[in-house]
Image (tube, rainbow, N blue to C red):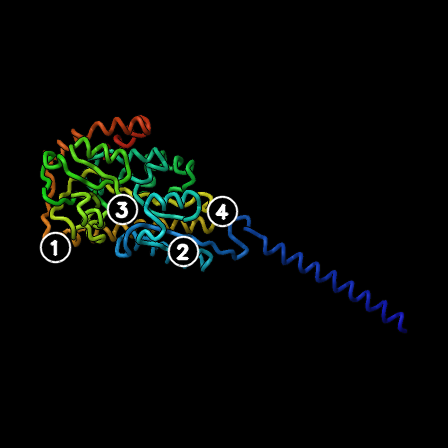
Amino acid sequence: MKRFNKTTLVMLLAMMLLISAACSSNESSGNNDSGNSNGNSGDGETYTITMAHVASEAIGLHQAFLKFKEEVEEQSEGRLKVEVYPNAQLGGEREILEGVQNGDITATITSTGVGANFVPEVAVFDIPYLFTSKEHARHVFRTDGPLFEKIAPYYEEKGFKLMSFTDQGFRILSTNGVQVTSVEDVKGLRIRTLENSNHIEAWRALGANPTPIPFNEVYTSLQQGTVDAQENPYELTVLMKFHEAQEHVTNIKSIFQSLQAVINKDFYDSLPEDLRALVDEGFASAVEFGTNFLDEKDEEYIQVLKDTGLTVNEITDDELEKFREKTSPVIETIRGQVGDELVDLMISEAESY
């Protein structure tokens, strides 16, 4: 009797171990499932997207980031988490792009002027006095256009996935001392520029003394008199309070402030197919939202400048042509950087509008 009980007990224990091992195997197989045949994630894994920019929370760009966060978190039912860092918390534009490139930061929307330091072909956006209106430039930069199709692979070679181009309108000129109404007024002007050799060359061609200064140091540089002038869109000039240290504003329509929306390519490629689709949709929605926000606010920003006591004017068409002629050598410099094909494509797209 005792022998029977011991044998039975051993058999029961063996059966229980086999059943337990089988269950563990099935659970392990389910946890490691990275996706179904249609690309949908089956393991409930979450992904965190860190987004950074250098401006304040009041800017349209920040509102676009928040729109992206709201949409993708809701649509993904929590599988995508988005963290937004404004006010240069993670560094200047150059540092942020470096972060996106190496994966420390997931995504950003930042100026193409700085982007040329990472993707040299983006220098084609530095051609001055090419566009006459926002609509003109946006037609050329559209995501379904030949320019986007041509330039997107260059981003991928450098570790970025290009999601879209967007903008902040034309870079306007704010100054102390002299109110710029002609090319002659620019001579000797100490102006802050982006860390961009083509922008620097354009200002030198006009007779100015350009000084590259990081964006987060512009206000202090104006306040301390390190420079007399700066160029940024109306939105940035007002919201970053640059106008508080300036006397005049002139819309000279030199460079259109184009922006690049980029995400780390390795991160993007690692996402399940359904989440990549949500990221695509989120960026498209955010860019549209940010553009509309900017357009609605521009007149308000101009009024703020006037109410603060600054003089606000625009360059006449005849004077604009003089600016265009003086800076035309920059186009040849850019040809040497990116090649004739890309420059000719940009110019032909602009002329076809």
Where is residue 239 drawn, in percent x and y? 22, 53
Up-down relation of residue 201 to residue 245 (above or below): above
The answer to whether 324 appears left or right of 126 in the picture is: left
Q: What number is the disc on residue 270?
A: 4
Mark closer to the observer (1, 2)? 1
Q: Pick whichever of labels 4 and 2 is earlier in the sequence.
A: 2
Q: Pick whichever of labels 3 and 4 is earlier in the sequence.
A: 3
Whether residues under marks 4 and 2 lie with C-beta atoms below 8 angstroms apart, the answer is no
Question: What residue did someone put label 2 on?
Answer: 82
**Mark 3: amino acid:** Phe
Whether residues under marks 4 and 1 lie with C-beta atoms below 8 angstroms apart, the answer is no
| Distance of label 3 from label 4 (alpha carbons) | 32 Å
Q: Secondary structure at mark 2?
A: strand
Residue 214 found in image quarter: top left
Mark 4 Cα-neighbour bin, 10 Å: few <14, some 14–19, many ≥20: few
| Distance of label 3 from label 2 (alpha carbons) | 24 Å
Where is residue 121 drawn, in percent x and y? 34, 33
Question: What residue did someone put label 1 on?
Answer: 308
Q: Secondary structure at mark 4?
A: helix
Q: Which residue is depicted at the point 11% across and 48% down?
A: 247
Q: Pick whichever of labels 4 and 1 is earlier in the sequence.
A: 4
**174 and 157: which one is in front?**
174
Up-down relation of residue 172 to residue 198 (above or below): below
**Mark 4: amino acid:** Ser
The answer to whether 225 appears left or right of 36 in the picture is: left
| Distance of label 4 from label 2 (alpha carbons) | 16 Å
Where is residue 79 drawn, in percent x and y? 47, 57
